[in-house]
Image (cartoon, grey):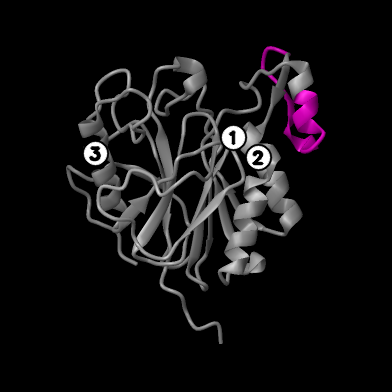
Amino acid sequence: MTGPQPGTDVPPVVEVDLGAGVRAGFSTRRGGVSRPPYDALNLGYAVGDDPSAVDRNRAGLERWAGAAVAYATQVHGPGVVVLSQPPAPGTVSVGEADALVSVSPDVAVAVLVADCVPLLLADPQAGVVAAVHAGRRGLVAGVVEAALATMVEQGASVERLRAAIGPAIAGQSYEVPAALQDEVASVLPRARATTSWGTPALDLPAGVAAVLDAAGVVHVTHLARDTWTDPALFSFRRSQRTGRFAGVVRPAAATDPR
């Protein structure tokens, strides 16, 4: 799959290798037209930004992806939506879900984040990909497991899966009450962490990695960028009124497994 050539209307995206033909990456704040405090590549409509600016930003990301990009209304749950064709032009959301699975190279899928973990998954041979929004509640509710199970239902193989854990708030920055830490750690022990200033914390990327490990996914890339400390990324905890960046992935055309 050939990506677009660089241009003024194609935003810079941090690309990740999820296999031959798969286009995958994570946007940052750079490359868009939104004004402060959403500057510049805000991709979320529900944060108070000018919708026309979001329209232009999303159009630029579609040019980067080389296909229509589908988004969901994220509700911090385990819901999954499967797409086999692009949504109708102008569709803001394909429904309530925190994981989107695409089985067509004509449609990319994306999740929006500003501290939560964006997880991208792909089986290049099967032509199946997923974008997963793994916040604290969704992670505990099993959104990663639900996305993996749906991909397998669509023909993917766990042994072939490649995963990329995107930028998110780090364990050293995500302070939580001790009771909440205990609640999450009772489900995901590896998510227990301590902030850099010595208080109870949660490491959501480590929690995602633990789920992938338990499922047998061995090809995992982790972009260890902390949204709390990295000004190139949106962070709700840092700024409250801010934009959203995306993890986006487009499948390769399926190949004959024989």
How packed is label 2: few (under 14 Cα within 10 Å), some, or many (20 or more)?
many
Residue, x 67% and y 58% (percent of image)?
A: 217
Queried whether the magenta region covers residue 190, the answer comes back as yes
Q: Is mark 1 on a helix, strand or loop?
A: loop
Circle nearer the N terminus (1, 3): 3
What are the residue bounds of the magenta stretch? Answer: 181-198
How packed is label 3: few (under 14 Cα within 10 Å), some, or many (20 or more)?
some
Residue 229 percent location from the top left of the image: 50, 21
Query: In the image, is 146 to the left or to the right of 11?
Result: right
Residue, x 60% and y 40% (percent of image)?
A: 77
What residue type is disc 3 on?
Asp
Total marks placed: 3
Circle nearer the N terminus (3, 2): 3
What residue type is disc 1 on?
Gly
What residue type is disc 2 on?
Leu
Queried whether the magenta region covers residue 159, the answer comes back as no
Residue 214 percent location from the top left of the image: 76, 53
In space, the residues marked 1 and 3 are separated at their CA atoms by 25 Å
Residue, x 47% and y 69% (percent of image)?
A: 127
Residue assigned mark 1: 135
Asked if the residue at tag 1 contacts the one at tag 2, i.e. Cβ–Cβ closer than 8 Å, the answer is yes
Residue, x 72% and y 57% (percent of image)?
A: 215
Query: In the image, is 163 to the left or to the right of 51?
Result: right
Q: Which quarter shows the C terminus? A: bottom right
Q: Is mark 2 on a helix, strand or loop?
A: helix
* Image disc number at residue 55: 3
In space, the residues marked 3 and 2 are separated at their CA atoms by 29 Å
Residue 66 percent location from the top left of the image: 29, 58
Residue assigned mark 2: 139
How packed is label 1: few (under 14 Cα within 10 Å), some, or many (20 or more)?
many
